[in-house]
Image (cartoon, grey):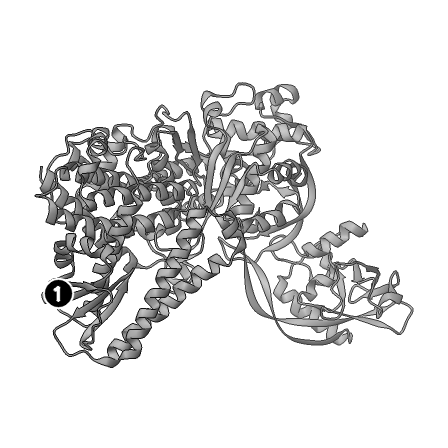
Amino acid sequence: MEFSKKYNPSDFEKEIYKKWEDDNKFEPKKSKTWETFYIPMPPPNVTGNLHIWHSLTLTLEDIMVRYHRLKWDDTLWVPWTDHAWISTQTVVEKKLAKEWIWRVQLWREKFLDEVWKWKDEYQKNITGQMRLMWASCDWSKERFTFDEWLNKTVEHVFCDMYNRWLIYKWEYMVNYSPALQTVVSDIEVIYKEEQTEMYYITYFISWSDNELTIATTRPETLLADQAIAVHPKDKRYKKFIWRKVILPIVNKEIPIIWDESVEIEFWTWALKITPAHDSTDYQIWKKHNLKLDYRVIDANGYMTQDAGPFAWQDVKTARENIVELLKSKWNLLKKEPYVHKVWYCERTWCKIETIISTQWFVKSSELAKKVIEWYKKWDFVIIPDRFNKIFEDWIYNLRDWCISRQLWWWHQIPAYYDVKTWELVAVSQDEQWVYKKFWKENVRRDEDVLDTWFSSALWPFSILDWDPKNPSEMYKKYYPAQVLETWSDILFFWVTKMLLLGYDFTWETPFKTIYLNWLVLDEKWKKMSKSFWNVINPIEIIEKFSTDALRLSLVIGNTPWNNMNFSIDNVDNNQVFLNKFWNIFRFVFTNIWEINEDYNDLEKTITKNYSSLLSHEKWILSRLKNVVESTTEWMEKYNFSVAGADLTSFTKDEFADFYIEEYKLTKETSKHWNAVLAYSTLTLLKLWHPYIPFVTEELYWKLTSWIYLIDNSWPNLIDIKKDSVVEEKMGILYDIIRAIRNIRADKWVKPSDFVDIIFKSPNDYKDFLVENDPIIKWLAKVKEISIIWKDWVIENEKLSFWVVSDIDIFVDLWVNLDAEEEKERLKIQIDDKKEYIKIIDHKLLNNEFVKNAPENIVRSEHEKKRQAQEQLEKLLIKFNSL
């Protein structure tokens, strides 16, 4: 079989994915563990292209899925795309506008036909990108949030909740986008700091010479003021409570009330209450049962007829005119510059209006009771746990959730009104029943659609063909999900909603673990945005480098659950690593060609002949078992960054740099070199497969006659022995080699030049050093090695010094040694050794550690400290002698 000398991912990545998909490798397979693994996918929108954040979430989920497939858990990962309600409708409206066609000119059905055409065209683009970005999801079960079955489920849930008084229609303060002409959620609102002016307006107290000064950035809203609020404990204004003030311009009396939400130290210590145009004022209005008989600004930012002489003016013009009028009436005390936050629509960048509107709401606080009850019982956990506090702040203080939107594209609310009185006559998912009962011409369906988060909240069970009367086999087998992986910034908007509706309809948590990932920032730690010109296209990176290099760059090398800065240099470095990875296995291929023996048979051969294995062979098997155990542990704890970093270190520093090099030296004397090499090679490919699936699959095919790695099993190495004695000795050997290499590097010794070594050691290590003489010479580029008794004194100032365990190492570089340079090198080692002892001391002084750790671990720490102190003493002696 041809084996390229260079890692060329473009030669095989797309081909491998197609083979996997064609051979149904992403579909669930019968479990050998009696366990299932199901993970819901956060859906990308059909409107756009996948960005780097999608790459991160797809990578993390694909790692989990591939790991559980190798464990032979019955694994389900369902792909789905979201309708992107506002984005899709906006794009289609712009498309029609080019043809001078406006949405309102079309019937709803005709407009939706246009939207469906657009969706069908662009959905293929997004799913194609998901395939390019390695998502090994079961495409036979692909879902779209507006599929007929899912639409029926959404309508059923709405009607059921309405019948249980959990959904109601009411007048409330909401965010309104004039450009989109719909209510929007808080997640679709961006806060932007703007320079404006603070106006100080005088309100005269009726039948008195006293006055109150109110500070506001929106003087145009005073026309709708309903009261002035002061804090009940504010001695300055306490005597005025329940008196009245004269509202400027309008010249009507409004009451002075008290409310504890007024900040005593904020501006003028008194707050004007305009419930029709401010959410805080609206809450105060509800508590005090004030009047709310009109509003002066409409949803599109124009003054209403209730604004009197300012009617139909835009807000900016009205503000200027009102300020001039206040000046003329001596009600404007002063104005001064002020910076405050203004709400903007995320999609259109128009200013958000806070308006009172009749909308549909969910009683979130009622649903939250069940979530809180099970949260306290640890029915689900949040990773990382620092988000527990954020979750608690939300779940314990939920306000009712506005679920209606003034759009056409999405799940239309199944509510029907009398066309003459506009009274609600029915809420039903059976449209024909409604028409039969009330006659079609007498009723009209609610024009509004549901909030996108309402349907998305049902996702964990709705995509499993959930039916409350007859649960599907898929639902019974996989629900609840073992884990939900998503972005931390939608913990409230999506995750909390899924918990609310999941517990309400299935009586159990929709997922056992909530895994919140991190933000991917640019190289300068700035958030990626089109306006900053720093958005990275993952498809371009894949085409330039490889899928596997991008996956490694997103997961490894970052502190778990902390934001990461994405660097192209990091992708390039990982591509270099993958090239080395490729060459490691190419070397294996050139030595053993095809591995025809079964993996389990190789393990039996090794365990049967363990006593005849060479030291480095026992060592690599012992280390391999440790790595399998630690990787498995980190995988189970969802700590993929640490697991990947450990694997990288083992592959480069131990497997390639030491084991393979020793293998080259000892191949002729080893009896079972081929079994150990083949077994450790296949094990390493299995461990790496969840992270770099394409290159590992390609290498596995080349080494095993086209057997699929994706169908294989996660290694456990049950019968392989962990040999601590061999590990300790080989660890010392490799520390010696590293020490010599470090000295060579520090002294700028050419790779082709040799050095001489003197080992000063106790008799315990003499045979060990003699046995490994060829290895030290080969790997550290040493010409001559001398071993002397530990009590002998060496007074050659030309020798560089290092200490490993109880072995003193003297390196003769065949040049005159610069004393100052050597002292500087030794000082670094001394400082490192002191810090190491400090860390051990900290551990040993911890009573909890000493009390709870196994006795052998505590003894081991004491032994490490003893050795480190002896090494430090030797380093200090050498340092002081220079």
The answer to which of 254 and 93 lies nearer the viewer is 254
Residue 579 in picture, x, y percent from top left = 19, 51
Point out residue 283 in the picture as x, y percentages from the top left corner.
Answer: 73, 52
Mark 1 lies on a secondary structure that is loop
Q: Is residue 584 above or below residue 801?
A: above
Q: Quadrant of residue 786?
A: bottom left
Residue 477 seen in render: yes
Three-letter residue code for mark 1: Pro
Give the farthest residue toward the right.
Answer: 207
User: Mark 1 sits on what residue?
Assistant: 751
Q: Residue at x 14, y 30 (%)?
A: 596
Look at the image and tell me in which quarter the N terminus lies: top left
Q: Residue at x 42, y 62 (%)?
A: 526
Query: In the image shown, does 235 or 178 lie closer to the viewer?
Result: 235
Residue occupying image coordinates x 39% and y 63%: 836
Q: Is residue 872 left or right of residue 199?
A: left
Residue 545, compared with residue 62, is above or below; it is below
Question: Can the viewer see residue 540 in this picture?
Answer: no
How far across and down, in percent of the image, does residue 480 sit?
50, 31
Question: Looking at the picture, how far across and down is residue 675, in whole percent?
Answer: 17, 36
Instruction: Please tell me in which quadrant of the rendered image residue 818 appears.
Output: bottom left
Marks counted in the figure total 1
Report the side of 472 relative to 131 (left or right).
right
